[in-house]
Image (spheres, rainbow, N blue to C red):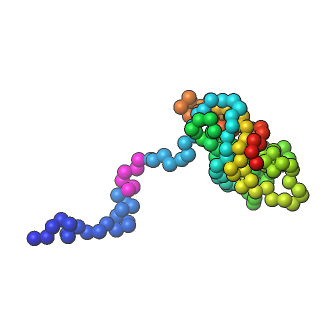
Amino acid sequence: MATAHTMAKPISAAENRRARKKNLIPVWDGKEYQRHDQGERLIQVCEIHGPEWVRRYSRWSIRLGCSLTDEPGEVSYFMNMGNNRKSPRVGRHSNYYKAWTLTNGGPPRKGEGMDPAIFLGKFFRARIEDCGKDSNDKDKINEEVYSHITELRELVSP
C-alpha cells in the first residue's frame, strides 16, 4: 500500500501561483518610519537610498537613513534632486547642495561629482520635525505621522 507521501504529486509553478492568487491578502513590505521627539538632535548617517526616480511625483529623490545617538531609533532625510527624467540634478539652493557642501567642507568645483557616499558614517546636528501633512497638503491621521530630518545644521565629526 502506498503512503500519502509517495503518492503526493509535486505542485507545478503555475499551480502554486494560482493558489497564491486565491488568497489576495495584501502584505505591507514598505519602510516603517518612526516618531521621535522634535528639535535639534545628534544623528549618524548609516544608509543611502537612491537617488531614484519617483514616478508619482515626477522627480528624483534620495533618502539618507540616520540613527539617533541619544536613544534607539532611526530617522530619514528626504531630498529632491530635480525633475529631469534623464538624470538627477541639484541647484545651488537645494537641500542636497547645502547638505553636501556642509559635509564636504566647501562647495563643489565646476564639473565635480556630488557623490552621496560622502554622508555615510558622518555625525550631524540635525533639525527633526514631525511630518504631519500628506502629499496633497492634508493633515495625516495621528497614526501616520512620523519624524523626519528637515535640515542638517552642523557637521560634528568628519
Horizontal and vertical percent position of residue 47: 64, 51
Vertical comparison of 16 with 73: above or below: below
- Which residue does the image show at 67% across and 40% down from the upper left? 43
Q: Is residue 55 visible?
A: no
Residue placed farthest to the right in the image? 110
Residue at horizontal 38%, vertical 66%? Answer: 14
Q: How many marks?
A: 0
Magenta extent: 20-25
Which of the 4 image quadrants contains residue 32? top right
Of residues 108 and 46, the one nearer the viewer is 46
Residue beneath the point at 13% across and 70% down: 2
Given residues 9 and 126, the one toward you in this image is 126
* Quarter of the view holding residue 39: top right
In the image, residue 7 sits, relative to residue 59, either above or below, namely below
Locate residue 135, reporting x and y percent.
Answer: 65, 38
Q: Nearer the viewer, residue 116 or 10?
A: 116
Is 4 above or below relative to 38? below
Above or below, 52 against 7 in this view is above
| Residue at the limit of the structure toward the front, as seen here | 157
Relative depth, front residue between 100 and 41: 41
Q: Which quarter of the rendering shows the N terminus?
A: bottom left
Q: Is residue 10 magenta?
A: no
Q: Is residue 116 left or right of residue 11?
A: right
x and y, in percent, of residue 12 in the image: 34, 68
- Horizontally, residue 133 falls left or right of residue 143, namely right
Residue 20 in view, yes or no: yes
**Residue drawn at 59 percent across, 35 percent down:** 71
